[in-house]
Amino acid sequence: MTDINQRIETLANLIMQVKHIVIFTGAGISTESGISDYRGPTGMWKKYNPADFTIQKFLSSYETRKQRWQMLIEGGLALNSQPNRAHKAITELDRLGKLDCIITQNIDNLHQKAGVSENKILELHGNMQRVICLNCHQTFTIEEVIERIKKGMEVPDCPNCHGILKPDVVFFGEQLPPKTLEQAIHHSQNCDLFIAIGSTLSVYPAAYMPLYAINSGAKLAIINLSPTELDSYATILIPGKAGEIMTALLHIVRNKTS
C-alpha cells in the first residue's frame, strides 16, 4: 500500500469514528469540471487583474459591468458546468449519513447539481445562479439575465425598477453574508472532523473556518494538489486531485458501512 493509499485509509477510518463532519471546498474541487481555479498556474488571476473585480468598480463603471457580464457569457460558468467525481463522492458521503454540512468558497452551484440538499450547503461567496437587483432586491435567475444579454442588452438592468443587477456573489470589497458566515463558524466550532478539499486556505475570512475547527479540538484533513497555508495544522495531508482521492475514499467508506 502506497503512502497516499495509507493516508486515504486513515481518513476513511476517521470518518467512521466521528459524529460531526464538515467538508470545506475551494476552487480546486471544480477544476475537473472545467472551471478555472484562481491562484493556480492557469488560474483566473493570471488572466485578469483582481483589482478589476471590486464592488466599487462594478457600481461606478458601466464599462466594468459590461466586461463582467461579457466574461460570464464567454466563460459559460453559470450554465454549462457539471459535477465531477469529487462532488458526487461528497454527495454519497452525505447519503451515507457522514456529513453535517458543506462550507464552500465556490459560486458554481455544483454541490446542488450533485444532489446535496440546499440546507446543508453554506456558500460563503454566494452563487452565480442568482442575480439580485441592488435597488429593489428582487432576484432573478442567471438564465433570465443571460437571455437579455444575448438579445443585445450590453448591461442588463432590473426590469422592474431599472436598478443595477449584480451576480449574487461576493466581490472584493464586500462582506461575506453575515448569516451564512455565522452558521459556518458554528459548524466549524462544533465538528469532530474538518475536511478541506481543493483550497489553498489563503483567502480570509473563509480560511478561518479550519482554524475554528482545530481550536475547538477537531481533526483537520487537507486534500489539495499543492501545499496550503495550513498544512502544518493537518492531522492528515493528502496531496492529489480531488476526484481521484474522493473516489478512493468513498470506496473504502462504503465498504466499511456495508
Image (spheres, rainbow, N blue to C red):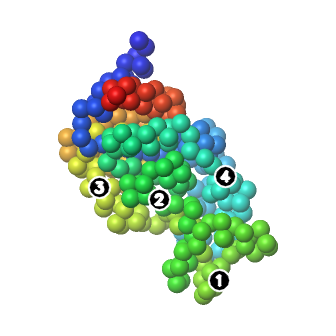
Q: Which residue is mark 2?
A: 125
Distance in Å between CA atoms under marks 2 and 3: 14 Å
Q: Is residue 24 visible?
A: yes
In the picture as drawn, the residue positioned furthest to the right comes out as 152
What residue is shown at x 24% (from left), y 41% (from top)?
A: 19
State left or right for residue 114 relative to residue 19. right
Amino acid at dot 2: His
Amino acid at dot 3: Ile
Distance in Å between CA atoms under marks 3 and 4: 32 Å
The local secondary structure at tag 2 comes to loop
Residue sitting nearer the eye, 181 or 15: 15
Q: Which residue is mark 1?
A: 159
What residue is shown at x 68% (from left), y 54% (from top)?
A: 76
Instruction: Tell which tag, 1 or 2, sits nearer the viewer.
Output: 1
Quadrant for the C terminus, please: top left
Q: Which residue is mark 3?
A: 185
